[in-house]
Amino acid sequence: MSDLIFDCVAARAEPYAVAPTLVLRLRVVETTGETVHCLALRCQIRIEPLKRRYSDTEGERLVDLFGERSRWGDTMKPLQFAHVTQLVPGFKGAVEIELSIPLTYDFEVATAKYFHGLDEGEIPLLLLFSGTLFLSGETGFSVEQVPWHKEADFRLPVATWREAMDSAFPDSAWIRMRRETLDALSRFKSRHTLPTWDDTLAVLLHEAEQNDKGVA
């Protein structure tokens, strides 16, 4: 019976990907001396937000996601980040592989909101493993399942996530809206001869603030 140990040893942004991509470096160790012919690996990655501290500014940004800070003990649940499959080539002893994880800036996705809300520090990740292990020995091939309890912790630097996003969207972010909203913004932009969408939203925010002050 084989036994695998998993450890996430590093993370980096992929600078040459078409879309923002995070790469996790994974070390897999087989501890019983069996020869691994190949490993069809599945990895589920979760964010565990309760395992870090947050500044006041970060807390304000995360209100939409978790509610008021006084309720975080009840509302701050693990977030599903990604599911990755990877075919690991044969090895004996240990091998290191890379898991590529596509990232999104869609603010309808909870993980994108969470990442964007952080200024610095680390993001606590939990990697949960499963899959099928193909072994080769003196009596031929055998097949085993990777036990569901196999897991690894990793603390992803916020700077690494930001580097991956900035490779595609430098100093930018994206929001999704209905076509009707976009058409209304377009008419406002044209009517006020504003050069960019950023300027359009800035003018609208300024007008809203002035209206709030007038009401007050």
Image: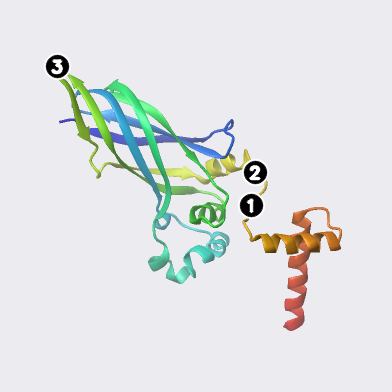
What residue appears at the point 43 percent right and 54 percent down from the top-left corner?
Answer: 52
Task: Bin the neighbour count of mark 3 within 10 Å (Cα to Cα): few under 14, some 14-19, many 20 and up.
Answer: few
Task: Classify the position of the C terminus by image quarter.
Answer: bottom right
Q: Nearer the viewer, residue 160 or 178?
A: 178
Q: Are marks 1 and 2 in contact (CB under 8 Å)?
A: yes
Where residue 174 is drawn, which disc sits there?
1
Cα–Cα span, label 3 and label 1: 56 Å
**Mark 2 residue type:** Phe
Residue holding disc 2: 169
Residue 26 in the image, given as x and y percentages of width and height: 38, 33
Q: Nearer the viewer, residue 74 or 139?
A: 139
Where residue 124 is drawn, which disc sits there?
none
**Mark 1 residue type:** Trp
Judged from the image, the secondary structure of the residue bearing numbered disc 2 is loop
Where residue 138 is drawn, which disc sits there?
3
Earlier residue among tags 3 and 1: 3
Task: Bin the neighbour count of mark 2 within 10 Å (Cα to Cα): few under 14, some 14-19, many 20 and up.
Answer: some
Q: Is the residue 133 above or below the residue 193 in the image?
A: above
What residue appears at the point 67 percent right and 43 percent down from the top-left corner?
Answer: 170
